[in-house]
Structures are given as structure tokens and as C-alpha cells.
Image (tube, rainbow, N blue to C red):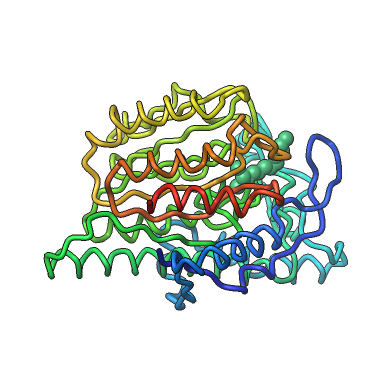
């Protein structure tokens, strides 16, 4: 399996975040990627994984998902922030612009967002998305890793169907950070800045392909849901812990709207969910929803923060459980792009990601 990876993704390294009122070390750390990479490198003695550097496809694919003003904000936020004397560790909002900020529509329409501090509250919806000096470089590279992986998967599919030597369901892994599934077209949230999976999906849809997004990160992928809420392609399916972050979305009743109605499927689960229960639910959704959709590609939002000892997520999934999850994903029988999302238990993050991919390939 090809693994797309770049060290530029390691540069983004905020110092801290606020969780449940506590100021803590930033959990979405560069070491996460280093550990996964090392673990896969070690497995490669069995020639399982082949590492590939991304190419640069520019801003165009990114702008198919995100607004121009939001991208400009991400590019300039840190510089503007330090220019007015704010903390050099990075940008964090101190006030948020809410829809109900004022009952007077005349005040609402006059809200002025000029200061870098005000902008932070406009483009960021929580306190876990600090923008440090190198953030944009890593965020951009993370998207390029996923774009490169998407194009490679497409290429493999095209070549295999023309030569008729069907190797029917290859997989590719985009080992990237920062993650993406909490970001929507103009908001960063939950360690996410650009929605990598959405960018990849848009590329495939642009080639008239049908896509299923299976989001197995512990947290509800509110950004991905929002981006595609009105669309019947992709089919978005999320299995996530509830009640938990992002707190306001992820209910079963959110099914999509208009043409998109029925193409957004949320499966909230309790923290007690163990391997057997999780696999039962996953197999059911594969048979009942994923297979009948008849997609051309599967994109997996791969979080391993479902692991039993994850510091912020955590069902009761074991390392062995991840192998079985990988096997189930293989049974979907589609060309598959795995895109790295969450997972914060550093002692096992390598093994757990490795086990998903081993389950998928063997
Ligand atoms: N009590 C991803 O896994 N704060 N993002 C959580 C928990 C933010 C998680 C607070 C968690 C974001 C990609
Ligand atoms: Zn997560």
C-alpha cells in the first residue's frame, strides 16, 4: 500500500489548547505522525508500505471547498496577530460571532470585523485551533498529501481497468496532519483547518464518480456533514461518540436536506461501545447503506481516537478490534482512500493505525 507522507506536516505545533476549562499541552502534536510513520516503516520490512512524497497542486482544489476569504485569513492570521502585539504562541479567539449576537438586524449587518482578534472569532469556532507561525504551511501540505493520494488512487484505477488486470480494490493511505473533518467551508475547529476529505471528494465528484465517506473518527465530522448536507453525492456516514465534542451536531435526525435528504447518516454511540458492538453496527451500515449506494470510491476519515484509552475520545475498542474494522472496510470492496484524522493515545497510535491497514490488506 502506498503511504503519502510529508515532514512539512510536522511544522504546525501549537503549545496549548483549552479542554473542559483546563489549559493543556496541544494534543494534536507532530509526534502523532512521527510515531505512525515509524511504525509503518518498521512493518515495511515485510514490504507492506511504500512511502511517497506529495506533489504541489496549488490552491485550486482547496478553493472548491473553502471560501477565498477564509483561506486568506489562514494565510495571514498569525502575522496580523503578532503585529498588534498579541501572544506569539499563536492565534486564539476571545469572542465569537454568533447568529443571535443581536436581535436587531441593523446591528447584525453592521458588525465590523477588522481586528485580528475579531477575525479569530469569526473564522474559528472553539479553543482547539491555535494558529502558530508554521500552521498554514502544514495545513496546505496536509491538503496536498490528500490530493496527491487521491490522484494516485484514480490513476491506479484507470490503469487497472484499461489493462483489465483487475486488482479490484486497492487502498492508499494519506498520512497527514492537521486533520480535517471538523472544518467547514469557512471555519476551523477541533484541530482542523482544511477539510482534506471534502477536498478529495470534490476531485472525484468532478470526474463524475460516486463517493462514500465513512467517518470512523470518534468525533462527529460536523465540517464534512455541513459541506455536503444538501448533496446526494457523497453519501456521508459517521459513527461517533455521543454526547461529546462537537456537542451541537451528530444526531440521527440530521439526514441531509433537499436533494441531500437521506444521504447523511449519523450513528451516535455510547462510550461503552466495545469491539463486538462496534463491528455489529459497522457491518449493518455496510450492508444496509454503503453497498446499495453503489459508489465508485470509498474515503475513510480514519480516526483511532475510538481506542479504549484515548485521552479525549474513547469507545472500548482494542488494538485487535482495529484489525477487524480494517477487514470490514475491505469487505466493502471499493477503491479506498484512508485519510488520517484523530487519535491521541501516543503509546498505541502506530499499532492501531497499522492494524486497520493490515486488516484491510490481508
Ligand atoms: N472534551 C479530532 O479528533 N476538544 N478532533 C475536545 C473534549 C477538541 C477532536 C474536548 C477535540 C477535537 C480530529
Ligand atoms: Zn476525533
Left or right of 78, for residue 276: left
> In the image, is residue 312 above or below residue 153?
above
Left or right of 360, for residue 100: right
Please state which of residues 305 and 50 is positioned toward the viewer in this rendering. Answer: 50
Is residue 276 visible in the rendered image? The answer is yes
> In the image, is residue 166 above or below residue 239?
below
Is residue 110 visible in the rendered image? The answer is no
Residue at point 64%, 29% (across, down):
244
Position in image of residue 228 (x %, y %): 39, 43
Count up the numbered dots.
Answer: 0
> In the image, is residue 74 above or below residue 212?
below
Please state which of residues 163 and 208 is positioned toward the viewer in this rendering. Answer: 163
Residue at point 49%, 40% (across, down):
216
Position in image of residue 92 (x %, y %): 77, 53
Image quadrant where residue 98 sits: top right
Ligand 1 found in image quarter: top right
**Which quadrant does the N terminus fall into?**
bottom left
Amino acid at each position: 500500500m502506498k503511504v503519502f507522507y510529508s515532514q512539512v506536516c510536522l511544522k504546525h505545533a501549537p503549545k496549548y489548547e483549552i479542554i473542559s476549562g483546563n489549559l493543556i499541552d496541544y494534543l494534536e502534536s507532530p509526534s502523532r505522525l512521527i510515531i505512525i510513520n515509524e511504525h509503518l516503516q518498521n512493518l515495511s520490512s515485510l514490504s507492506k508500505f511504500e512511502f511517497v512524497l506529495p506533489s504541489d497542486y496549488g490552491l485550486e482544489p482547496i478553493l472548491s471547498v473553502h471560501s477565498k476569504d477564509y483561506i486568506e485569513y489562514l494565510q495571514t492570521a498569525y502575522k496580523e496577530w503578532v503585529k498588534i502585539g498579541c501572544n506569539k504562541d499563536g492565534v486564539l479567539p476571545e469572542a465569537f460571532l454568533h447568529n443571535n449576537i443581536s436581535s436587531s438586524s441593523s446591528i447584525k449587518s453592521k458588525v465590523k470585523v477588522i481586528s485580528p482578534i475579531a477575525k479569530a472569532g469569526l473564522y474559528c469556532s472553539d479553543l482547539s485551533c491555535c494558529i502558530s507561525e508554521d500552521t498554514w504551511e502544514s495545513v496546505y501540505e496536509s491538503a496536498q498529501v490528500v490530493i496527491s493520494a487521491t490522484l494516485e488512487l484514480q490513476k491506479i484505477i484507470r490503469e487497472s481497468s484499461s489493462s483489465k488486470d483487475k486488482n479490484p480494490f486497492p487502498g492508499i493511505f494519506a498520512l497527514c496532519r492537521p486533520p480535517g473533518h471538523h472544518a467547514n467551508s469557512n471555519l476551523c475547529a477541533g484541530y482542523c483547518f482544511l477539510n482534506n476529505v471534502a477536498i478529495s471528494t470534490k476531485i472525484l465528484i468532478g470526474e463524475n464518480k460516486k463517493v462514500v465517506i465513512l467517518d470512523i473518527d470518534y468525533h462527529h465530522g460536523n465540517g464534512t456533514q455541513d459541506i455536503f448536507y444538501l448533496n446526494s453525492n457523497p453519501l456521508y456516514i459517521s459513527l461517533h461518540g455521543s454526547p461529546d465534542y462537537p456537542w451541537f451536531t451528530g444526531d440521527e435526525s440530521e439526514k441531509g436536506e433537499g436533494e441531500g435528504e437521506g444521504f447523511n447518516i449519523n450513528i451516535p454511540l455510547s462510550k461503552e461501545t466495545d469491539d463486538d458492538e462496534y463491528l455489529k453496527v459497522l457491518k449493518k451500515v455496510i450492508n444496509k447503506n454503503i453497498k446499495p449506494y453503489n459508489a465508485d470510491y470509498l474515503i475513510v476519515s480514519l480516526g483511532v481516537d475510538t481506542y479504549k484509552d484515548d485521552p479525549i475520545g474513547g469507545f472500548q475498542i482494542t488494538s485487535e478490534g482495529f484489525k477487524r474494522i480494517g477487514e470490514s472496510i475491505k469487505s466493502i470492496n471499493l477503491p479506498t482512500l484512508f485519510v488520517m484524522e484523530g487519535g491521541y493515545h501516543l503509546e498505541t497510535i502506530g499499532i492501531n493505525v497499522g492494524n486497520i491497514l493490515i486488516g484491510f490488506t490481508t
